[in-house]
Image: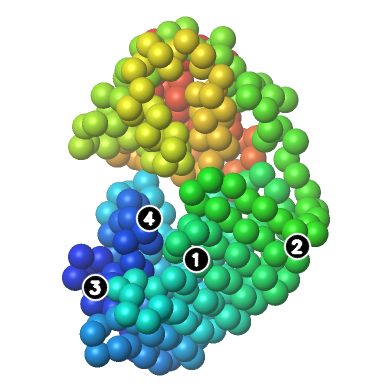
Amino acid sequence: MRIHDFALGVLLVIAPALGAQAQATVAGEYSRISIEAGLLKANLDGTLDELTGGVRIVLKSDKPEVKPLPIAAATMKFNWPKGASTPVSIVMDGKVEIEHPQATVHSQHAEWNFEKGTVVFTGSPVMSSTVFKEMRAKSVTIDFEAGTLEAEQGSVSEVQLNQAGMGGGSNPNLLAASDVSDWTGLITALKEQGKAQTPSPGRQILAQLDRQAQSVLINTPAADLAKDPSLLVKQFNAVLRKPGLYNAEAWQGTTLGEEAQGLLKQEKLSVDDQIRLNRLLLQAAYPQFIKEM
């Protein structure tokens, strides 16, 4: 069976099954979902019980900067406490695959615990991201609340050494505190663009930050944040490493140089070229605040 592009607000089986905490996580970035399954089992109250026969769920967003999030498994089982209105977990078995734009995880088993806000992967999990390649472990735990990842008995085939650190690190295109001439002005510009409904570089940057960083940047006075920009430098450099920063609508009206235009035309960029492109995008968007390399 196929169920395509339901709005979360009227989705009869997924929205009730996810529960309040999971709905909040999904609704923050995604507004639609598509489902493919060999067999769907639901309860008479409309809540989802089990998906079997090969399952593929794709979370989708109306925001152009947010890429679809596919999740696949042989089966997905929703665990409901007796009399509860929300499940405590979703258990996924057999060829579990999550293809997030910033990281991919493959395993044979995964459990998403809504109460704890964690996903635990077991059964030979393999995880790769822009920072490391092929991290293998006995188990991998992602904690959404804390924003952390824990691997038990793990090994990594390759790590990008220039991904760590608070400042510019070994890559000259990463940002250092001294590269910004006016932190208060830059933060104020980001806040103003973030509040507006039209696409902008500021909205793109905020979309790439984790929820805690978004909250801090939006709710803390610009002058207070500018007193110690070390945390902002770390967050900006995390954004520079990500492939999802550029959006044509957001940078419409911003003059991009030949180098940036050339990098945008390439189908696949190396880590260093991705950082370079994103640094050029920031400089073009905020030339009055960010120094040219």
Label 2: few (<14), some (14–19) or many (≥20) C-alpha neighbours in 10 Å: many
Q: Residue 206, position in %: x, y?
A: 38, 35
**The image quarter in which residue 160 lies:** top right
Q: Residue furthest top?
A: 181
Which comes before the other along the chain, label 1 or label 3?
Answer: 3
Q: Amino acid at mark 4?
A: Thr
Which label belongs to residue 11?
3
Q: Cβ–Cβ below 8 Å for labels 2 and 4?
A: no
The residue that disc 4 covers is: 25
Front disc: 2 or 1:
1
Q: Residue 2, position in %: x, y?
A: 33, 84
> Front-most of 82 and 287?
82
Q: CA distance from mark 2 to mark 1?
A: 20 Å
**The image quarter in which residue 163 lies:** top right
> Front-most of 270 and 23?
23
The residue that disc 1 covers is: 113
